[in-house]
Amino acid sequence: MEGLYANNRDYPYAEGTRNSVNWLENNEYILNTQTTAGSFYTNLNLTKELEMRTVIGANILTQENNEFRNSVLDNNAVARAQASNEKQTFWSIENYLTYNKEINENNSLTALLGVSWQQSNQFFVNADSRNFPTDFFKYNNLGAGSDNIAVQSFADREALNSYFGRLNYNLYGKYLFTVTGRADGSSKFGDNNKFSFFPSAAVAWRISDEDFLVDNALISNLKLRTSYGVTGNSEIPPYSSLSLLSSNYATIWNDSRVGGTGLNRLANPDLKWEKTAQYDIGVELGLFDNRISLEADYYYRKTTDMLLDAPVPQSSGYATIRRNVGSMQNKGLELGLSTKNIMTADVTWNTSFNISMNRNKVLSLATPSDIFGVGGPGITNETSIIRVGEPVGAFWGLTRLGTWGTDEAAEAAKFVSYRNGLTILPGDIKYKDFNGDYIINDEDRSIIGNGYPTAWGTLTNYVSYKNLDFTLELQYSWGNDVMDMNLHSSEDRQALANSYTTVLDAWTPDNQDTMIAQVRDTRAGYVTNVDSHWVKDGSFVRGRNIMLGYTFDQNLVEKMHLNKLRLYASAQNFFLLVNDELLGDPEVTLFVVVRATMSSLKG
C-alpha cells in the first residue's frame, strides 16, 4: 500500500487520534466465544404430600481474544499484537424439599426447605508484543516481536452457600400469610461475617371475597397486602476483605531496577453483608368485572452497612479500605392502571400505564467526610459525591457562568490562573467563585445535578381487529439529570480533537454571550472541568416498541400441518424525544454519567 493515512496528529499540537478508515482497515480484532451450559433435575415424590427436587447446573464460558495492529496503522511504525484467553466456569447445586398439605376445605399450607451451593472460577492470561520483522505473523507468533513483550494473568474464585425456608398458609382463600428465612454465606466477606440471616413476612387480604363484596357490581377485585423483609447485597469483587499482593513495586539496587512484591490493600476481616430492610403496603382494585384494574404500592427501604471504599489516614500507607460505611433510604410510590377499552367479538383495545417515583437520600456515613470516586469514569476530576442528606451519587463540580467578556478583562486577570498558568483573559470559561478568594479550586465545587428521575414509566396500547393486531409501547422519564462527559473532549479541548458543531458558537469579540470558550492555538492551553454546563436534562419520551402482526386462521394452519402461523413486523427505539441536545441515548450514551452509575447503591 502506497502513501500514508491522514491522522489527527498531522495537525500541529493535536492529539494522536487515528484516521477512522485507517483504523478499520489495519486493525484486526477477533473475539471468539464458546459457551457450554446445561442443567439436570430430578423430582422425587417421597409421599403424596412431600416432594424433593434437585437441580444441578453448570456454565462454561471460554473466550479467545486476538488483536493485531499492523505497521501501516501508525504510518509505518512498529506493529503490535496481543492474544488473550479467558475461561469462566460456574456450577450450582440446589435441593428443595416441599410439603403441600390441604388441611381441610378452608385451610392449606405449603412448606419449603432448601439448600444451595454455587461457585464461580475465572482465569485470564494475556501476552503483548511489538516490533515484528514482518506483518505476516500477526498474533500467531508473539515471540517474533522484539520489543515490550509483556505477559499478565490473574485468577479468582467466589462461592455462595444458602440455606432457606418458606411457609405459606391460606385461610378461606382470602387470608394469605407467608414467612421466609434464609441464611447466605459468601466467600467475599471477612472471616468474622461470612454468613448473615435474611427474614421476611407477608400478609394479604382478599377483601372482594368477603360476603359484603362478593356480588358487588362495581368492585370485582379488592386485595390489600403488606410485607416486610430483609435482603442482602454481596456485589463486590472477590477477596474484597483480604489484603492483596501486587508486583507493581520497584526499587533501584546497584544501579539497576529491581521489581518487588508487596501488599496493595488493607484487609478488613469484619467486612459483612450490606442489608436492605423494606416495608411496603399495596392495594389491588378491579372495577366493572376487571375492565379497569388499578395497583398501587408504597415502599420504604433502608440500606445499612453499605459496601464502599472509605478513606483511611495517609499514615497507613494506603488511600482507602473496603468497609461497611453507612446507611441510606429509598422511598417511593408505584402506580399501575390497566383498562379494557373495547371488548367485542372482532375488536379488542387494551391500555396499560404505569408510573414509578423514588426518592433517595444518604442517612449516615462511617465518618462525617464526603466520599468521592464512586462510579466516575476516572478521566477527569470527581464527577459525583456521597454526602449525608443528599441522593447517592449526586453530580459534583464547578458552576459555569459563561465566558469572560472584554469589559471584564481586569476582573478576570485577578484570578489565580486555571489555564496553564497563563493570565485569565476574555474568552476564557467563567466559573462561580463561591468564597470570593479569586481561586477556582475544590472550595468552589458543589452539587450540580441529580441523576434520579422525578418519575418514570411506560404506556402501552394493544389493538386487535379479527386476525390483525397492533402494539405500541412508549417509555418516559422526567426530572433526572445526565452528565454528558463527551463535552470534555468534543467541546472543551477544541484544538486537540474533533469537536461538536457547538464550538461554532465559541466566544469571539462579536459573540460574547456564550458558554463556549474562545478557540485558540493549543499552546495557549485550554480549560476543562466537570461543571454545570456538562449537566443536561435527561428527560425523554421513547418509542420503545411498535408491532403489527397477522395471525392466520386456524383451519388454514391445520391444513398446512402447523399449530400456529403468525407474521409480524416490529421496530424498537423508533423515536426519541429529549429536552436537551445529547449525543445519542440519554440512558446509554458513551461517557454519560447517569443514574445507572449508582444503581447498585439504590437498594
Image: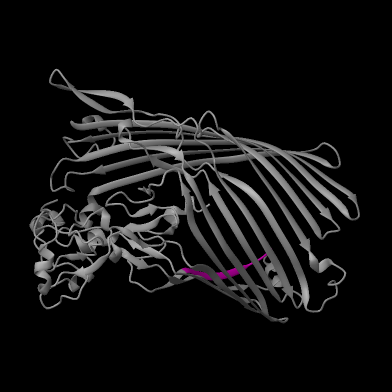
315 versus 456 height, above or below: above
**Outermost residue, right direction?**
104
Seen in the picture, residue 344 relative to 19 is either above or below; the reply is below
Residue drawn 39% across and 29% down? 244
Write the start and end of the magenta stretch as one range: 563-572
Percent position of residue 403, x then y:
18, 69
Number of numbered callouts drawn: 0
Q: Position of residue 414 (x, y in %)?
A: 11, 62
The residue at 51%/43% (across/down) is: 305
Which of 417/456 is in front?
Answer: 417
Q: Is residue 564 magenta?
A: yes
Residue 100 drawn above or below residue 535: above
Give the quadrant of residue 115. top right
Residue, far top: 254
From the viewer's side, name the closer residue of 204 and 337.
Answer: 204
Residue 263: image location, x then y, percent:
35, 27
Q: Pick whichever, 593 or 32, lies toward us.
A: 593
